[in-house]
Amino acid sequence: MKVTVFGTGYVGLVQGAILADVGHQVICVDVDADKIERLKQGHIPIFEPGLDSLVKEKFAAGRLSFTTDAAEAIKHGDMHFIAVGTPPDEDGSADLRYVLAVASTIAEHMESDKIIINKSTVPVGTADKVRACVAEKLAERGRNDLKFDVVSNPEFLKEGSAVADCQKPDRIIIGTESADTVELMRELYAPFNRNHDKIIVMDVRSAELTKYAANCMLATKISFMNEIANLSERLGADIEMVRQGIGSDPRIGYHFIYPGVGYGGSCFPKDVQALIRTSDSIGFDAKVLKAVEARNYEQKTTLFEKIAEHYENDLAGKTFAVWGLSFKPNTDDMREAPSRVLMEALWAAGASVKAYDPEAMEETQRIYGTRDDLTLCGTKESALKEADALVIVTEWQSFRAPDFELLKQQLTHPVVFDGRNLYEPERMERKGFSYYSVGRRA
Ligand code: UGA
């Protein structure tokens, strides 16, 4: 099938690549000329396992192309994905400016019938807005003869496993009232819908809400566990035992019940906030969501509080090795990353940071530039040198089994603050460390 994808971010680029991979003919459009030029030259703007080779391969095979020319791209596609950003505006509600700009561009240039597919995470009611926008533009052009449908088809990929998630989706949600559209969408996704039927067809508004409900449910699990972790610390219990104890109940499950330093990234914080704003806008008090957000906000300061307490609030002149800067492993994304809250609090208290991350060093440099109280280190070992303590913020695999003797030698004092519970407290004590983790006895 002929597919056009608007937006070459995480969602658009991955979607374009995997559709090209199964034989569709895909054009990706972006307004960022520099990005498009770099993509054509094989420079993939994000770190995502498997994406680089997939994009290059499909580009070379002529099945995936990149352009800034929206008119040409609209001429090409029968199916048009909208996969542009929906950043939070000042009050936290999703800003639909880019989504509606794409809708308007499609209406401006379309010369044949089109299916418009909302892939971006958008509030309930957005498909109606897109529909109205396209209809209005077509009327202006005097082209009411052209037919189109607007489908909600939310994306559930996770950063760090985006390609695999898209190639093997748990479910494919299709929100539309049109049986013809369902048939076309089934054809488009047929290569991903083998073994058993993963397609769930529903009305547009339910599909739009499904996306938010999924992310908010997962965020709720995390905030709930962080709350129980805080309680565990105060009650002398061990959250890791409690986690295993409750996860063994299949109704609860082991996924997304890891306590830590709060959820970050481009999705959970934004989506929880957007659903709260949507609720407020219709006069509904979303009490659970507000609590989920408040708990997460506080959880991001938990490591700093433990550090401040250990040093009796005297952090001026201290140096901390920080391992893990991205909001989670296997990505270089630092949006809403707990590491930022930590580093900024340490700097405000007069401390310095020696930072290391396997992928996010460039991103850290881009965000913070050059400053006296930040040293970007090329290896995890070099970050330790002469630091007063080690702070672990992200659970990269390479941090799980460090050389503890070296750690002791390099740090001025054997002190570890672990925001991800990577080590056993008793073993750390036996090795002579002062070890602080989350939700466990110190
Ligand atoms: C999330 C969802 O998991 C995807 O299904 C969804 O498609 C995506 O948002 C989106 O809306 O685009 P992502 O933000 O990439 O994906 O990352 P997750 O793996 O879900 O992690 C989010 C945050 O939760 C991370 O900061 C992670 O450290 C934290 N987390 C996760 C915990 O603190 N504990 C857990 O048990 C799990």
Image (cartoon, rainbow, N blue to C red):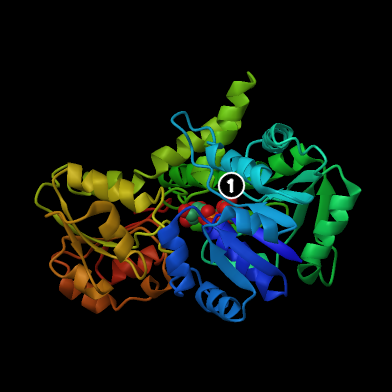
Identified at 46% across, 75% down, the residue is: 42
**Badge 1 amino acid:** Lys
Image spot of residue 251 (x, y percent): 73, 52
Q: Is residue 321 visible?
A: yes
Above or below: residue 215 compared with residue 415: above
Query: Is 362 situated left or right of 75 in this image?
Result: left
**Relative to residue 120, is residue 185 depicted above or below?**
below
Examine the image and state in which quarter residue 250 appears: bottom right
Assess mark 1: CB under 8 A from ligand 1? yes
Left or right, 197 with respect to 166, comes to right
Residue 233: percent from the left, percent from the top? 41, 46
Single out the residue that lies furthest toward the top.
283
Image mark count: 1
Q: Which residue is mark 1?
A: 221
How dense is the environment of label 1, judged by Cα within 10 Å: few (below 14), some, or many (20 and up)?
A: some
Q: Nearer the viewer, residue 142 or 279?
A: 142
Q: In which quadrant of this rendering is ligand 1 seen?
A: bottom right
Which residue is pictured at 58% across the width and 62% down the height? 28
| Residue positioned most to the left | 317
Residue 216 point in image, percent of width and height: 60, 42
Q: Is residue 329 visible?
A: no
Residue at 53%, 32% in the rendered image: 93
- Which element type, helix, strand or loop, lies under badge 1? helix
Q: Nearer the viewer, residue 191 or 137?
A: 137
The quarter of the picture where the C terminus appears is: bottom left
Q: Nearer the viewer, residue 343 or 2?
A: 2
Quadrant the N terminus occupies: bottom right
Furthest-front residue in this view: 142
Q: Position of residue 421 (x, y in %)?
A: 42, 60
Asked if residue 387 is positioned above or below residue 296 in the image, the reply reads below
